[in-house]
C-alpha cells in the first residue's frame, strides 16, 4: 500500500491557499460542495441530476470533514447523529458554482485530489491517472472535470507510510507564517479556524452554504425533507415514471440502495439476535453506537468506509477488511486492542460481520410478491399449528402476532395518537400526544427497512373482528399485483418518514403505502364461529384460501405422522376409547349428514389437547368436547348423541355421573373401547400399592 506523499500534500494545499487569496476565490464553499458530492446517497459514477433531492448522512459528513481538515489529533470527536441533510442542485448548478466560488478560475486537478485523498491508502499499482478517474467518479463530476479543473500533467508523488498530520500542519503554518497554536482547523484561507470542521453549523465548509441568497444558485441545502414542502423530483422518481422505485423489492436490486447506516442497522440487529452473542448485553442501541465508533476509527486508519459495501465484489471487500484488521501497525489495531483485547476485531471478523455480509450476499432477490393467506377449517384442525410451522425458526423480530375480536379497531391495528410522557422515568413528566404504532405499522416499517429477510404478520381469528373497519383503506394493499397505493394519514406519514431516516422519498412512503414483497400476512379462521362482521367479497378475493381438513388416517396427506391418531379418551384407568374413532363417528355420522350443521361444526384433530401422554382424561373431555357438542352443535337439533331431554348438568359430578353418561353415549354411537396397555409407570404404581398393603398401609 502507498499514500500521497507528505511533501506533495503540503505543496498542493499551500498552492491552493495562495491561489484562493490572490484570486479572491471562495474555496471553503467550493470544497464544502465537494464534500457533499462525495457523500451523496447514490452509487459512484452516477451523475448529478438537477432538481432532484439527494441525501447525506450527517455523521459520515462530519467525520470526513474532521479527518481531512482538523489537526487537533488529541481531541477528535465521535459523530453519531442519525440526522440527514437534504440537497438539491438547481438547473445550471455547475456553471453557477464555477462562476460564484471559483470566478471561472480553474483549480489544478492533481493538487485538489491530493488534498481530498490525503489520508487514503492506495494499491501500489495505482497511478496518477487512476486517482484522477477515481476522484471524478466518486464525486459524481466526471463530465464536469474541465468545468472546475485544469490538468497540469503533474505526476502525483507517493510514499509508503501515511503522512504525519502533525508535520503537515507544522510546515503549512511555517509557509503561511502562522504562529497561533490555539486553533487547529485548516481550510483554504491564510489563517486557522477555531471551530471543528465536523460541526456543520460552525465549521468553515458547510455553514457558509446555508447563508446567502447567491448560494441558492448552485445548491439548496436543508436539515429537513425538502420534498415535503416543495414540488421537486426525488431520487426514487426516475425520469421514466413507468419504473418507479416503489416496486424495488419486486423489480430492482435492493443491494444498490444500501447506505452505510443501513448496513450498521442490519448488522446490529443481526448481531443482537445471535443466540451466543454477549456483546453490549444484546442492547441494540449500544451495538449501533459501537459500530459507528468502529466506522470512524476504521476510516481514520484506512480512509475507507467500513460499512459501505459493493455487493458485486463482497469477497474482495471481506479479504481487504480481514487484512486491515490484522495489520498491527495501524491506529485501528491499537484501538481494537484497548477495547476488551480486540473486541472490535472479533465483531468485525469472520464469525460476525464477515459472516453477516456473506449471508446477506446469499439472499436471493425476491421475484414474487409476499403472500396473503387465510387458513380456515373446523375448530381444532391445526390452523394455528400450520401457521407456526410456516414461521418455525424465525426470530421474534420478524413476527407480529395479533388476535382479532369485536372490539379491535383500526387504531389498534395501525396506530394512532395517544398520550405519552415526555420522560417515562419521571412520574411528574409532562404529557404529550404522539403517534404510537401498532402491529401493522411495526411490521411494515421493519420489512421495508430490511428487504433481505421475510417478515410475517399473523392474525388469529380474523373473522371475529370487523375486517372492514380494522383494515380501512389498507385492505387495498392486499391486492399485491396492483400498483395501487394508499395515502396514509398525516400522522402515520410523519412517523414513517422519521423511521425511514427522514427520507420522504423512501419507496415505502413516497407515493403512499405499498406492501413490500418480503411482508407476508397469514390469518386463521374458525369456520364454526358465526362472525359478527361478515367479510365482503372485495376483501375475500384479495386472499389465498387454504383449507385445513380433518385427518382420520395415521399418515397425513403430506406424508407425515398424524399425532392425534394415537390420542385416547381415558374414561377410567381400564377403559379407554380412540379419539380418532370418536371424532370420525360424530363428524361423519351425526354432523356432516345434518343439513343444518355441516362441516363447519365438525370437531378437528386438535380440538382438545391430551392432559396426559396421549391421554384425554374425562374431566377436560366433558368440560370442553361435550360442552361444545351440547351448546354449539346439537342444542337445537334432533340427534342420538345425547339422550332426549338430557341437560348438560347431568354430566356432573364428572367422576360418577359423568363417566356413566359418557359410557352410555359411546355405546349409542357404536364406539368400542380399546385394549388398555399397562405402562411401566402403572406397573410401578401397582407394586407400590401391593407393598403398602403387605405393610398394613392399605
Image (cartoon, grey):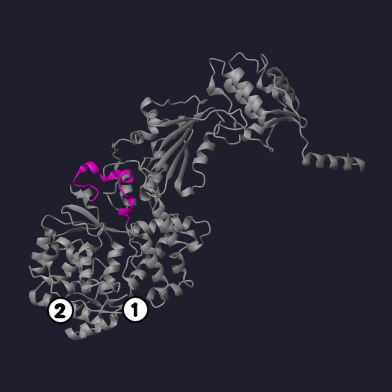
Decide if residue 146 is in sight here.
yes
Q: Quadrant of residue 309?
A: bottom left
- Count neighbours of disc 1 (C-alpha within 10 A) and say few if under 14, some if 14 to 19, many if 20 or more: few
Q: Give the residue at mark 2.
A: 15
* Number of numbered discs visible in the structure rendering: 2
Q: Which residue is more in the foreground, 46 or 334?
A: 46
Q: Which residue is more in the foreground, 266 or 663?
A: 266
Residue at left offset 33%, top offset 74%: 76
Q: Quadrant of residue 599?
A: top right
Q: Quadrant of residue 355?
A: bottom left
Which secondary structure lies at badge 2?
A: helix
- The mark that comes first in sequence, 2 or 1, is 2
Where residue 42 appears, x then y in whole percent? 25, 56
Which secondary structure lies at badge 1?
A: helix
- Count neighbours of disc 2 (C-alpha within 10 A) and say few if under 14, some if 14 to 19, many if 20 or more: some
Which segment is the magenta one?
235-258
Query: The N terminus lies in which quarter of the figure?
Result: bottom left
Q: CA distance from mark 2 to mark 1?
A: 27 Å
Decide if residue 425 is in sight here.
no
Left or right side of 264 for 598: right
The numbered disc on residue 399 is: none
Where residue 254 appears, x then y in whole percent? 33, 50
Query: The C terminus lies in which quarter of the figure?
Result: top right
Residue at left offset 56%, top offset 15%: 594
Q: Badges 2 and 1: C-beta atoms under 8 Å apart?
A: no
Membership of 171 in magenta stretch? no
Residue at left offset 17%, top offset 73%: 110
The numbered disc on residue 74 is: 1
Where residue 30 appears, x then y in whole percent? 16, 67
Q: Which residue is more in the foreground, 241 or 649?
A: 241
Left or right side of 210 for 579: right
Amino acid at each position: 500500500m502507498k499514500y500521497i506523499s507528505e511533501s506533495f500534500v503540503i505543496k498542493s494545499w499551500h498552492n491552493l491557499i495562495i491561489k484562493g487569496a490572490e484570486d479572491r476565490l471562495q474555496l471553503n464553499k467550493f470544497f464544502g460542495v465537494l464534500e457533499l458530492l462525495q457523500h451523496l446517497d447514490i452509487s459512484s459514477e452516477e451523475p448529478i441530476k438537477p432538481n432532484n433531492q439527494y441525501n447525506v448522512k450527517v455523521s459520515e459528513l462530519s467525520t470526513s470533514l474532521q479527518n481531512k481538515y482538523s489537526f487537533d489529533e488529541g481531541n477528535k470527536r465521535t459523530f453519531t447523529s442519525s440526522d440527514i441533510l437534504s440537497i438539491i442542485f438547481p438547473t445550471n448548478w455547475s456553471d453557477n458554482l464555477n462562476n460564484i466560488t471559483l470566478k471561472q478560475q480553474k483549480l489544478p486537478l492533481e493538487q485538489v485530489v491530493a488534498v481530498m485523498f490525503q489520508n487514503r491508502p492506495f494499491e501500489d499499482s495505482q497511478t496518477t491517472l487512476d486517482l484522477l478517474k477515481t476522484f471524478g467518479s466518486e464525486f459524481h463530476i466526471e463530465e464536469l472535470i474541465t468545468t472546475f479543473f485544469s490538468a497540469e500533467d503533474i505526476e502525483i508523488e507517493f510514499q509508503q507510510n501515511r503522512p504525519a498530520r502533525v508535520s503537515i500542519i507544522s510546515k503549512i503554518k511555517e509557509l503561511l507564517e502562522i504562529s497561533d497554536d490555539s486553533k487547529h482547523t485548516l481550510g483554504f484561507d491564510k489563517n486557522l479556524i477555531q471551530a471543528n470542521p465536523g460541526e456543520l453549523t460552525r465549521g468553515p465548509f458547510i455553514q457558509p452554504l446555508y447563508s446567502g441568497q447567491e448560494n441558492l444558485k448552485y445548491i439548496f441545502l436543508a436539515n429537513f425533507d425538502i420534498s415535503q414542502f416543495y414540488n421537486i423530483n426525488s431520487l426514487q422518481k426516475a425520469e421514466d415514471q413507468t419504473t418507479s422505485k416503489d416496486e424495488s423489492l419486486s423489480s430492482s436490486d435492493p443491494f444498490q440502495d444500501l447506505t452505510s447506516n443501513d448496513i450498521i442497522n442490519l448488522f446490529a440487529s443481526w448481531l443482537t439476535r445471535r443466540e451466543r452473542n454477549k456483546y453490549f448485553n444484546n442492547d441494540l442501541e449500544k451495538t449501533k453506537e459501537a459500530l459507528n465508533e468502529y466506522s470512524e476509527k476504521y476510516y481514520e486508519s484506512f480512509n475507507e468506509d467500513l460499512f459501505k459495501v459493493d455487493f458485486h465484489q463482497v469477497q474482495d471487500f471481506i479479504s481487504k477488511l480481514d487484512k486491515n484488521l490484522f495489520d498491527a501497525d495501524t491506529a485501528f489495531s491499537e484501538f481494537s486492542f484497548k477495547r476488551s483485547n480486540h473486541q472490535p476485531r472479533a465483531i468485525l471478523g469472520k464469525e460476525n460481520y464477515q459472516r453477516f455480509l456473506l449471508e446477506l450476499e446469499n439472499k436471493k432477490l425476491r421475484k414474487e410478491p409476499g403472500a396473503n393467506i387465510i387458513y380456515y377449517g373446523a375448530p381444532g384442525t391445526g390452523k394455528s399449528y400450520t401457521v407456526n410451522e410456516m414461521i418455525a425458526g424465525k426470530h421474534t423480530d420478524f413476527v407480529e402476532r395479533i388476535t382479532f375480536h369485536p372490539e379491535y379497531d383500526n387504531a389498534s391495528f395501525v396506530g394512532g395518537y395517544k398520550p405519552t410522557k415526555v420522560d417515562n422515568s419521571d412520574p411528574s413528566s409532562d404529557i404529550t400526544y404522539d403517534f404510537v404504532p401498532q402491529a401493522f405499522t411495526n411490521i411494515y416499517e421493519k420489512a421495508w427497512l430490511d428487504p433481505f429477510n421475510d417478515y410475517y404478520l399473523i392474525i388469529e381469528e380474523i373473522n371475529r373482528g370487523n375486517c372492514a373497519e380494522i383494515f380501512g383503506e389498507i385492505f387495498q394493499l392486499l391486492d399485491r399485483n396492483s400498483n395501487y397505493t394508499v395515502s396514509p394519514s398525516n400522522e402515520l406519514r410523519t412517523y414513517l418518514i422519521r423511521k425511514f431516516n427522514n427520507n420522504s422519498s423512501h419507496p415505502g412512503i413516497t407515493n403512499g403505502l405499498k406492501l413490500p414483497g418480503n411482508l407476508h400476512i397469514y390469518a386463521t379462521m374458525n369456520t364454526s364461529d358465526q362472525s359478527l362482521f361478515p367479510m365482503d367479497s372485495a376483501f375475500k378475493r384479495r386472499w389465498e384460501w387454504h383449507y385445513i381438513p380433518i385427518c382420520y388416517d395415521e399418515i397425513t396427506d403430506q406424508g407425515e405422522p398424524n399425532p392425534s391418531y394415537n390420542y385416547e379418551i381415558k374414561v377410567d384407568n381400564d377403559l379407554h376409547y380412540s379419539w380418532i374413532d370418536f371424532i370420525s363417528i360424530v363428524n361423519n355420522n351425526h354432523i356432516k349428514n345434518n343439513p343444518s350443521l355441516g362441516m363447519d361444526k365438525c370437531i378437528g384433530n386438535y380440538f382438545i389437547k391430551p392432559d396426559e401422554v396421549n391421554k384425554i382424561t374425562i374431566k377436560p373431555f366433558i368440560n370442553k368436547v361435550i360442552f361444545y357438542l351440547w351448546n354449539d352443535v346439537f342444542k337445537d337439533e334432533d340427534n342420538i348423541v345425547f339422550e332426549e331431554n338430557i341437560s348438560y348438568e347431568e354430566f356432573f359430578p364428572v367422576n360418577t355421573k359423568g363417566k356413566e353418561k359418557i359410557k352410555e353415549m359411546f355405546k349409542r354411537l357404536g364406539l368400542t373401547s380399546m385394549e388398555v396397555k399397562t405402562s411401566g409407570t402403572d406397573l410401578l404404581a401397582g407394586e407400590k400399592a401391593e407393598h403398602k398393603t403387605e405393610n398394613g398401609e392399605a
